Amino acid sequence: MTVKVSVVIAVYNPGKYVEDCVSGLLRQSLTPDEFEVFFVDDGSTDETPARLDQLAAEHPHFHVIHQESSGWSGRPRNTGIDAAQGEYVMFHDHDDWLGDEALERMYAYGRANDADVVIGKMAGIGRSVPRGLFRINRPRVTVENAPLMDSLTPHKMFRREFLTEHNMRFKEGRRRLEDHVFVVEAYLRAKSVAVLSDYVCYYHIARDDGANAGFQRFDPVGYFNNLREALDVVEELTEPGPRRDQILGRWLRAEMVERLRGKRFLKNPEDHAEKLYREIRGLLTERFGPGVLTHLAPTQQVVAGLIIADLYEDIRALAAWEVRIKPTGTLDSLEWENGRLNIGFSAEYEVDGVPLTFGRDGERDLLELPLSDEAREALAKQGITLDAPVDDSDVDLVIRHRENAAQYYLPVDSAPHRLDTADGSFRQRITARAVLDPETAAAGVPLTKGIWDLHLRIKSCGWSKEARIGAVHGEDVEAGRLAALTGEPRRLVLPYWTDGPGNLSLDVDQHTGKLERDAVMLVDPAAAVVDGGTVRLPLPLHVAADAGDPVQLRFERKNAGALSADAVVDGRTVSAPLPLEKLTGMRWAVRIGVPSAARGEAKWTRLPVDVVVDADGKGRVIDRHTPPASKRAPKPAPKKQSAPPRPLWRRAAGRLKRALTDQQKKS
C-alpha cells in the first residue's frame, strides 16, 4: 500500500516530553501501513536516542535517523524530507501531539481539494495559535482571500511532489524564522491551500519547564536579519503593489509593531528593549513603504509612525497606557430554548476601571491616546490620523475546552452603541446575543465531555483582548442557569459559576458533581409533595417538551437497597408512584438518574429531599438535612445561673487572710 503521510519530527533532548508526541502517533486512526514516522535525532545527549530506537524496534512504521547536532530544527527536517516516501509530509515538534484522527482527516481533506498545503486546526496549551484562520473550513484558499499569514509555523502537511518540484528545504544552522521562510514560499507557490477547521489536529504545547525553543529570548540583530530572508522570498515571488504590501504587513504587524506594545514590550529589560527597538526601526525604514502601513489597524499605524519618527519615549508611554486597558463584559440573559442556550451579553473596554472614551472632531471619531505634541505633529506629517473606526468594532464569544484548549466560535449578533459622556467624548458598549447549541457548537458536531469555558473577545481600533464572562451578571440570569438534556442519546449540559470569580462555564455530560450542588440550590424541599400514592419533585434542570421521560427516579436506604420508580417528566417536575408498602416505616434518600452519553447509562444524583413513609402508610417529603427524630439532639437543659461575684471588700479580705496565714507558717 502506498504511504499516505510521512511524519517528520526533529528531536533534540526532549526528555519526558516526547512521550505525549509518541502517544499521539500511536493513537492515529490511519493504519500503520498508511503512514510512517521519521524521528530525526539531532545529536541528543539525553536518554532519547535509546528510547527512539526501542520504539522503532517495536513499531515497523517508526524510523529513527541519528545525526550530529546542527543546532536548530532546519537540518533534521530536511533529512526527514529526503527520507520520506509518503504522498504528504507532515512536520511535527517533539513536545507537541496530534489529535487521534489528525493524519487521516488532513490527508483526506488535502486529496479532496487537490491541496499542495493542508493546515489542520491548532489548539494552544500555554501558547498562542491562530484563531480567525480556523473559524470555518476553507477548502481552497490563498494569501489574498484568507488569513494564511497568521499561521507561519511548519506544523502542516505539504504534498511531497510539490516540495520536490520547487526544491523546497528549510534554512539550516542555528537561526530563527526558518519556518517563516519555508512556509511563506509554500503559500506563494501553492496552487491551493486547504484549511481544516472542524477538528483539532495539532496541539501546540508550552512545556512546564519553559524550554520550548521559541520561548527563549533572542538576539534582535540575528532575529531581524533572519526576518529579512522571509521578506526576500516575498519580493522574489511577488510584484510590487497591494498584494505584496498585504503580505509584508503580517511581519510589520506581528513581528515588529506588536513587539513594541503593552506588556509584551515593557516586560523586556531596558537594555534589551532599546536594542529591540533599534533593530525594528532599522528594518522598518529599510524595507517597508507607506503602502504596507495601510494594512495595519489604526493603533498599529500610530506605533509604526512613532517608530519612523524615532519617538522612543512616546512608544513607551503609549505601551504603559495600553497595559491598563482591560476588556469587561456583563452577562445580561441566559435561557434554554429548544435545546439551545441563548446568551445575551454586553462588553466594552475600560482603563483603570473606567470606560475607555473616544473624542469627537465634527463628524470624526478620534482615538484619545496619551501622545506628546511632538508625536501628534510627526504622525500628521506622515498622513497618519487618529481616526477611530468605532463602527467596525465587534465582539466574539468563544467556547474553549479547559483541558485540551480546543475552541470554537459561537454564532453572535452584535451591535456597537455610543454613550455620551459629560465632557463631550463618548464611550462604546457592544451588546450581543449568542446561541450555543451543544450538539453543533464544535464546528457542526457535539461538544465533547468535559468543562468548557466561555470567553468574550472585543476587537476595536487595533485592540483585540479577551476576558471571561459571567462574574458580572444581571439579576434575572440565575433563573435561567439550569442544566438541560440535549442530543441523542441524551446527556446533561450544565451552565455553572466557577469557584472564586464566578465566571460562566459548561459541564458537558456530568464531568463534575456540580449537578448535585445545583440541586441543593435550585430545588425547594417545600415544593416537593406526596399526593396519595404519588410523589412530585421539582427538577434542577430544563427538559425539552419532546424529550420524553429521560429522567429515572429511585429511593435508597443504607442496608436496605434501592427501589426504582417509573418517572414522568412534566416541565420542571418529575412524578413517580410510591411503592408505599415497601417504604413504610422508613426514611429514604431520593436520587434522579440523568442520562450520560459517555457512560451509556444513567448517572445518579441525590436530591436535597428525603421521602418518609410513616407506619400508617402515609408519605411525606422533608428536607434531607433534617435529622431523624431518633438522632435529634435533646433540648439543652437551662444553664445554671452563676452566683453574683463577691463584693470587692470580701475579695480583699480573703487575700489579706491568706497573706497572714503564709507569714505565720514561715515564722
Image (tube, rainbow, N blue to C red):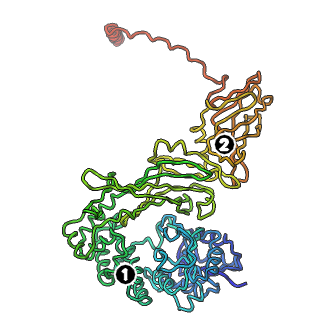
The reply to whether residue 366 is in sight is: no
* Quadrant that contains the C terminus: top left
Contact? badges 2 and 1 (CB < 8 Å): no
Please name whichever residue, 326 or 572, is drawn nearer the observer in this view of the structure. Answer: 572
| Label of residue 397 in the image | none
- Does dot 2 land on a helix, a strand or a loop? strand
> What is the crowding at mark 2: few (fewer than 14 residues within 10 Å), some, or many (at least 20)?
some
Q: Disc 2 residue type?
A: Thr
Q: Disc 1 residue type?
A: Gly
Please name whichever residue, 568 or 638, is drawn nearer the observer in this view of the structure. Answer: 568
The reply to whether residue 276 is in sight is: yes
Earlier sequence position, callout 2 versus callout 1: 1
| Label of residue 222 in the image | 1
Q: Which residue is mark 2?
A: 605
What percent of the width, then of the height, locates residue 491?
Answer: 66, 52
Q: Give the left or right position of residue 580, taking residue 401 as reference.
A: right
Hey, which residue is sitting farthest left in the picture?
Answer: 373
Q: Quadrant of residue 370?
A: bottom left
What percent of the width, then of the height, locates residue 143?
Answer: 48, 80
Residue 627, compared with residue 88, is above or below; it is above
Please name whichever residue, 327 or 342, is drawn nearer the observer in this view of the structure. Answer: 342
What number of labels is visible?
2
What percent of the width, then of the height, locates residue 572?
Answer: 64, 40
Residue positioned 19% across, 69% down in the render: 374
* Quadrant that contains the N terminus: bottom right
Q: Give the left or right position of residue 544, taking residue 223 as reference.
A: right
Between marks 2 and 1, how big is the CA–CA gap? Answer: 61 Å
